[in-house]
């Protein structure tokens, strides 16, 4: 696992936005606690030569929330895993995830409710097709955060197949920069890379 101190956390050295604390249940001396930001961006990198060849890996952000967490209820984050500088890498696709464990379920429910409304109210007042704009994402993340045995949460950032002879740095990222809303209360332990179950 890459420790939070080994990650590139935008504004991570600015006490107004992040603070470094010890958490007895962490495997590292320090973890990063989000005080308050509107631009959330975290990157981790590892040299592919440190990974076994011909193996599919998954990367996971390992975190938890404080009782004062806010800003993650309705705004998903974008996550990706891929080789640095290889924008066409198929494994490096961007996907959206909810960091709030309840948000994914809430989003599924709200999108289903909206689809039901669209099915029932297609025609407007004069018989014209009525267009209802969606305030929610039409693509709902399938997987939300999972609780680990150690009590922390993890969310998959993506997968990477480490082919024999493939060299470079693997970039793993989590960003929420589009919503513009302030968020706080996330505690990041690090990013774990492990072989993906078949």
Image (tube, helix red, strand yellow):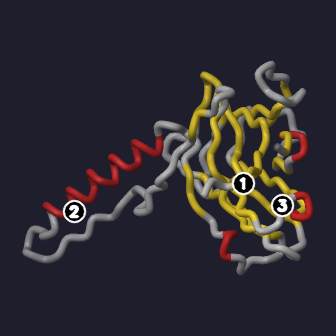
Alpha carbon distance from label 3 to label 1 = 9 Å
Residue 103 vs residue 17: left or right?
A: left
User: Is residue 187 shown above or below 12?
Assistant: above
User: Is residue 83 shown above or below 69?
Assistant: below
**Based on the displayed image, in which of its 4 quarters is residue 58 positioned?**
bottom right
Residue 19 lies, in percent from the top left, at 83, 31
Residue 184 vs residue 85: left or right?
A: left
Q: Earlier in the sequence, mark 1 or mark 2?
A: 2
User: Is residue 104 shown above or below 86?
Assistant: above
| Whether residue 129 can be seen here | yes
Which mark is in front, 1 or 2? 1
Residue 21 lies, in percent from the top left, at 84, 25
Which mark is in front, 2 or 3? 3
User: Is residue 110 shown above or below 57?
Assistant: above
Q: Which residue is mark 3?
A: 52
Residue 63 lies, in percent from the top left, at 69, 36
| Whether residue 39 can be seen here | no
CB within 8 Å, label 3 to label 1: yes
Most extreme residue toward the top, as rendered? Answer: 24
Numbered tag placed on residue 195 in the rendering: 1
Residue in view at x 82 percent, y 49 percent: 10
Q: Which residue is mark 2?
A: 118
Alpha carbon distance from label 2 to label 3 = 49 Å
Residue in view at x 26 percent, y 51 percent: 113
**Based on the displayed image, in which of its 4 quarters is residue 55 positioned?**
bottom right
Q: What secondary structure is found at the residue carrying circle 1?
A: strand
Residue in view at x 56 percent, y 42 percent: 145
């Amino acid at each position: 696992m890459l420790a939070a101190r080994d990650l590139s956390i935008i504004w991570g050295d600015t006490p107004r936005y992040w603070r470094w604390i010890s958490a007895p249940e962490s495997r590292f001396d320090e973890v990063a606690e989000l005080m308050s930001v509107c631009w959330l961006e975290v990157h981790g990198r590892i040299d592919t030569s440190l990974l076994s060849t011909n193996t599919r890996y998954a990367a996971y952000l390992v975190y938890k929330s404080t009782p004062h967490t806010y800003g993650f209820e309705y705004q998903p984050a974008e996550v990706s895993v891929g080789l640095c500088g290889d924008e066409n890498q198929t494994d490096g696709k961007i996907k959206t995830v909810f960091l709030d464990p309840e948000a994914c379920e809430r989003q599924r429910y709200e999108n289903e409710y909206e689809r039901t409304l669209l099915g029932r109210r297609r025609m407007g007042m004069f018989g014209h097709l009525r267009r209802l704009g969606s305030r929610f994402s039409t693509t709902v993340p399938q997987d939300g955060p999972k609780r680990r045995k150690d009590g922390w949460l993890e969310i998959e950032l993506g997968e990477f197949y480490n082919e024999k002879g493939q060299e470079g740095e693997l970039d793993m990222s989590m960003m929420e920069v589009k919503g513009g809303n302030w968020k706080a209360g996330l505690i990041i332990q690090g990013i774990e890379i492990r072989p993906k179950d078949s």
